[in-house]
Image (cartoon, rainbow, N blue to C red):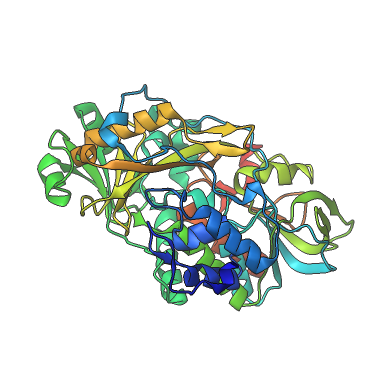
Amino acid sequence: VRLDQVPDSTLLCRCEDISFGSVREQIAAGHDTLAAIKRNTRLGMGRCQGRYCAVTAARLVNETTGRENHADQYFAPRPPARPVPAAALGFEKPEWGGHRRAITPNLARPIETAPLTQQKTDVLIIGGGVLGANLAYFLAREGEDVLVVDRDDINLQASGANAGSLHVQLLSFDFGAKAQEGGGPAAATLPLGPLSVQLWQQIQDDCAEDLEVKITGGLMVAESEAGMRFLAAKTALERSHGIEAQVVDGADLRRLSPALSPGLLGASWCPLEGKINPLRATYAVAAMARDHGARFLRSCNVERIERHPGSGAGFSVHTSRGTIRAGRIVNASGAWSSTVGDMLGVKIPVTGAPLQMIVTETAPPLVSHLIAHADRHLSMKQAATGGLIIGGGWTASFDQAMRFNRADRASIEGNLWVAGKVLPALAGLHVVRCWAGMNVNIDGAPILGEVPGVPGFYNAVTSNGYTLAPIVASLVTDLLVRGRTDLDIAPYRIERFG
């Protein structure tokens, strides 16, 4: 029996209440891979993690698109194999500074190999994550001819594996002894956070879709007097850069968030912080970019860039599917940016940082704020669906055989231990899923703007990428369209590396 005979109303994913009709709508909209369908609908994200729906969903995709079945199309295995009590997994681990730097392998699983027809564009954006989508939207809105290429598909790498925090105050490892480069570059980036959060709110209004942007404030908690002194120094620096932040004592903390541990001495409070749903937002921005004329090409791996002599002569970009002629190039490839820079002899000091996240079963309302920790790696928020999303920079690994980023058992244990110390109610919940993504490891500030000596080649690279994507995209758009920005971007230029 072919699946086209199954009524639209029939449930395909029982855990998340996803019907055949919902999946067919996604395929018709161009989201015709299991990974894209999963991100757009939550298919396979429930307690069974796709064990009962993935094969049928893959068959539906293949029957609809005419593609052959392939092992690479299925969901990556995510621990645990079945829901496990969070209390059984939490064990204290040593604290550390920074991220584990990693070689950034090619994780793409291209589904299209047909040669391109002749392609030409004024602005070629390399990278289809949240930054590439925002660049395409802002540039196309200005009337620019824009083409985005990605060797995989939109939102399928770092952006689509993001936990969705909107950070405005400094993370604990971006200030003090743990900070890279003494924390100066991260501090110089502080003014961008509020501007970018405002842009996210505007984008949500413009697209008339609920991106689950919620600005309810952020709390960085402290368990010790030393932690409180750390927060006092950090908030003083933040206020000097125009960030609204203050230290609150334990009594005020419990009024703000009663479910947090009574043993916490206080917190820094930043009312501008919040959360967003990265499974919705990148796709929504890309759709608006298309509405303004931007084009997107997937399964298109950039292999070599040839620069034509002469001012404004442009580039020939040789990809796995053919050559694209581009007037200007924007490198928005995140953790893979150094690979693109190497093609033009440009050293870009960026590496990958494989990180993991944890999500619990649905819970009653416990925390409405973005939660972080002054002494430990932690981020925690409650999603609109009710599950707690727990992360904060805990290291993941790379499975060479499967070509997947993979969560580490030790990181799962340490992350849950810290989260349980902060939120005692976590002990009564089950862990449903852990997953890994790739963060950008950089000195703490973005790298943006035209590269000296390589006219027409621009960078748009940043850590804290989901928060900062709109403002970085807006600044680079100003450079491309007007040749200048209203904001001083000297601290973010590549020249700072010498």
Q: Quadrant of residue 112?
A: bottom right
Q: Quadrant of residue 58?
A: bottom right
Residue drawn 64% across the image and 32% down it: 401
Residue 277 x/y as whole percent: 41, 59
Residue 214 x/y as whole percent: 32, 61
> Quick one: 401 or 318, which is closer to the camera?
401
The quadrant of the rendering that contains the N terminus is bottom right
Residue 282 x/y as whole percent: 52, 62
Identity of the residue furthest to the right in this view: 309
Identity of the residue furthest to the front in this view: 1
Q: Quadrant of residue 224?
A: top left
Q: Is residue 366 above or below residue 425?
A: below
Q: Is residue 337 above or below residue 177?
A: below
Q: Is residue 465 above or below residue 204?
A: above
> Quick one: 353 or 459, which is closer to the camera?
353
Residue drawn 27% across the image and 58% down it: 216
Q: Is residue 148 left or right of residue 390?
A: right
Tell me, yes or no, if residue 162 can be seen here.
Answer: yes
Tell me, yes or no, if residue 97 can be seen here.
Answer: no
Residue drawn 49% across the image and 32% down it: 99
> Quick one: 197 or 46, which is closer to the camera?
46
